[in-house]
Image: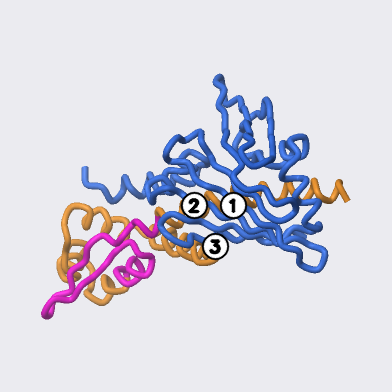
Amino acid sequence: MVQYSHSRFDASFAALSDVTRRGVLEQLGREDASITDLARKFRMTLTGMKKHIHILEQAGLVATEKVGRVRTCRLGHRQLEQEAAWIQKYQQLWSERFDALDKLVEELQ
Amino acid sequence: MKNPTSVERKSDREVVITRLVNAPPHVVYQAWTRAELFRKWWVPKSAQLNLLSCEMDVRVGGGYRLVFKFQDSEMAFFGTYREVAPNQRLVWTNDEAGDAGQISTVTFEEKSGRTLVVMHELYPSKEALEAALGSYDGMSESFDQLEELVTPD
């Protein structure tokens, strides 16, 4: 679970490291859009936009749904990200505690 | 070499923390139940809290109280021990958060002279769990930035 949350963080931050992908998230924050719409808006090929969407989807930042021939994109469930952040905090708190406990029990023995 | 600390969210309301400690259960139990030892490790340095006092009356129905100084104010963490099984298990309440406080259970299991510590925290609700540690570190900052980015103006 901890490893899982780390890889999720990596995927999220990697996804956010690109200016087009950040733009896509901003756009989807305003309204859902098809991949074709997004490709047009960001002046790129359909294939190029598909790649960006795929990365955002992998990171859980965007969700897509195909209806007929159109694939619609919307913002993904951030719940997962919040959950990962929460686990991370807990992990940090307890790692620190246990590291200090290790030192103490070493002295006690 | 540090042993890894595993944190797993078991359900909407529960989180389980597991760690192997390089000492037998009776030593770990002492560290958990004697105030003068407990205060040496429980408060994480990064929390920047100054522990002013630590009182523990480890018996069923007995209470504990930790008082901290944070910036210019004092705050206390307190609760009651519900179960006390020496060298094996402790259960206590966390009452500073009122109805949102979790029930903490820790067990100490002997593993070839070492101790597997399993800490189980049960919150009264999903919301209470998610609100816990809310201001603990700077991690939320990145998510605030993300929030800002994806929220329309």
Q: Residues within 10 Å of mark 2 (few under 14, many from 20)?
A: many
Q: Helix, strand or loop at disc 2?
A: strand
Q: Which residues are magenta?
A: A52-81
Is A99 positioned to the left or the right of A57 in the image? right
Is A95 positioned to the left or the right of B143 in the image? right
Q: Which residue occupies the extreme left position in the image? A: A68
The image quadrant where one finds the C terminus of chain B is: top left
Is A43 positioned to the left or the right of B139 in the image? left
The image quadrant where one finds the N terminus of chain B is: bottom right
For label 1, the residue is B105
Chain of the residue under label 3: A
Chain of the residue under label 2: B
The amino acid on which the numbered mark 2 sits, given as a three-letter code, is Leu
Circle 1/circle 2 CB separation < 8 Å: yes
Chain of the residue under label 1: B
Q: Residue at x 38, y 60 (%)?
A: A80
Q: Which residue occupies the extreme right position in the image? A: A109
The amino acid on which the numbered mark 3 sits, given as a three-letter code, is Val
For label 3, the residue is A2
- Chain letter for the blue part: B
C-alpha distance separating marks 3 and 1:
21 Å
For label 2, the residue is B122
Q: Residue at x 54, y 50 (%)?
A: A90
Q: Residues within 10 Å of mark 1 (few under 14, many from 20)?
A: some
Circle 3/circle 1 CB separation < 8 Å: no
Nearer to the camera, B59 or B30: B59
Q: Position of residue B50 (x, y in %)?
A: 65, 28
